[in-house]
Image (cartoon, rainbow, N blue to C red):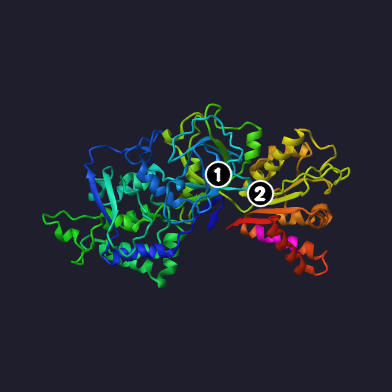
Amino acid sequence: LRRDNAELVVAEVSSGSVKRSMAVVEDNLPYEVTVIQPSNRSSPYNYNGEIQEWQQREFSQHYCKYFQHGCPTTAYQYNDQLGRTTQQKSSSNIPNNNNAPLLGRVTVNKRITADDWMQNTRHIKICITQSMDKNPPTTPGNDCQTLPYQAGDVATILPSNPSTLVDHFISVLPLSIRRVANATLHIQHTPNHSTTTMNHPWPTKCTLRGLLFHCADLQSLPEREDLFALSRYCKMRHPEGKDQRNKLISLSETSGAALYGDYIVREKRNWADLFYDFDSVRWEEKRSDDRDVAGHSNGEGRKLTISDLLTLLPSMAPRHFSIASSPSFSKLESSTCNENEAGFEIELCVAVVEGDTPRGRPYVGCCSGYLASIEPGDTGAVASDAGDTVRLWIHPGSFSKLPLNPLNVGQGGASSRYFETPVMCVGAGTGVAPLRSLILEREAQRMSNIGNASPSNGIGNGDDDDNILVFGCRKRSKDYYYSTEWENRADSNRLRTIPAFSRDQKHKLYVQRALREADDGELIARHLLERGGAVYIAGGSKMARAVKDEIVEALGARLDGGEKDAKRLLNKLKRKGLFSIEAWS
């Protein structure tokens, strides 16, 4: 896995690209595509939020089977009333009804960074009301004793491409394909094809436009093998056909790695850009005899058909986001989707991946851009009928053993602590999402037992802190996520905050330094060695590595065996679930 900012992306295995390209090179396409309904209708989409193709009765079961392939192997199962069962989904590659995604409706989508700040980070609330393969629950509320998810879990979201990109991509395809973009297609594997597996990568019944919207990863960067496969479709009769073919071949070769990096990677050119730049691929010569034009044995360039296109394009990969909410806290505050419907809510903290390339080309992350573009809807809307319905799964994250046992009576003396094990959360940027989930979960457990009363003693002396948050960002006034929430809890003596604002002073202040200097350099050792605390770290891999190094150094200064004993202690805590890191690059 790799993550770009807040957006966890499943990195495509290069062998998948090799298999796709080899299928083209070998003239042995793995798909047979049949137009089973004439294209006598306009686009099946209304971009104003009406029902989309994957939700239509004619196509829904075919899309459902396709979506099931994106299900994480550890995703939770839910019953008809959206109660989470103890059994997780099957790890088998063979899809089944239990692998169908949950359907949710975005009810809150607000920016939590300053309007004039460079980073657009969103707080998104999703009301989950049903599974795609089941009817909406008939019993209002979620009365199941098992919580719908756990603090620290991850939401795996299957995005869709923006309509502007789909329209642009269709416009750069050959005319013969554009004419049937809205026709109903039947897609099946070629019998005994070498790349055929139990997994079918595309819906068996759909339109090309619908497939491009929801199934093809048009925003991904084509790999070198893809460029080589595409070179076969450059038409030699086109004025630039020969030069374009040679350029694609050069880009695909190992010796052209620098050229590939400049053209594809640094400029983030996607599939639509590629087809636009190499227009000889879509060129079709008008001749009375179409046999040679459509053929591929005369050296003039192979004609691109829908079967060829489906062999070239990669399938949409789901993206992973740490859940920023607590199921117990939401239940305690009666934060449900709607009092008249079953379901539950999750919250996400999403940093939109966007910017400009060195040549000034704007780009936006596939899933973060998709989520940011969704307009909040009515909480009472039925998810399966909503045009902006989100498809997702929920599965365990890195923080699955959060300590929640209360302190025994008399064990803490005059301490204002409630929990037996204090927790320190260290994070930066959107790494605050799973940490917020953990803090709210512990707060919900405390409130459910002793109410909303504040601890009698002041928090901040390092001895009575149930929860400590060490959080780093650039500026307090710009990107201090959930600052009001943290300040309110700190004022109520329920949270100790140690912020690190890297750009609010002349010298850079990062979380590792703030952690090192806290309590005159004694916080780390006191928290772990004297108080028996837990530590959870979330954020970028560079930050997480630096924080871990600080912890090892601080413990090594106290332990007889130095850093060797410090690492041994952290490994022991890790096995108990009391030390865990969720990091991304």
The local secondary structure at tag 1 comes to strand
Q: Residues within 10 Å of mark 1 (few under 14, many from 20)?
A: some
In which quadrant of the rendered image does the C terminus lie? bottom right
Q: Give the residue pinned by disc 1.
A: 85
Chief SS of the magenta region: helix
How packed is label 2: few (under 14 Cα within 10 Å), some, or many (20 or more)? some
Query: Quarter of the image holding residue 497?
Result: top right
In the image, residue 483 lies at what x, y percent? 68, 40
Residue type pointed to by label 2: Arg
- As shown in the figure, which amino acid type bears the numbered disc 1? Thr
- For the view shown, which residue lies furthest in the left direction? 288
Horizontal arrangement in the rendering, residue 120 relative to residue 445 (left or right): left
Above or below for 116 versus 248: above
Of the numbered discs 1 and 2, the one sitting upstream in the chain is 1
Write the start and end of the magenta stretch as one range.
544-552
Q: Residue visible at 71% across and 55% down?
A: 578
The residue to which callout 2 is attached is 474
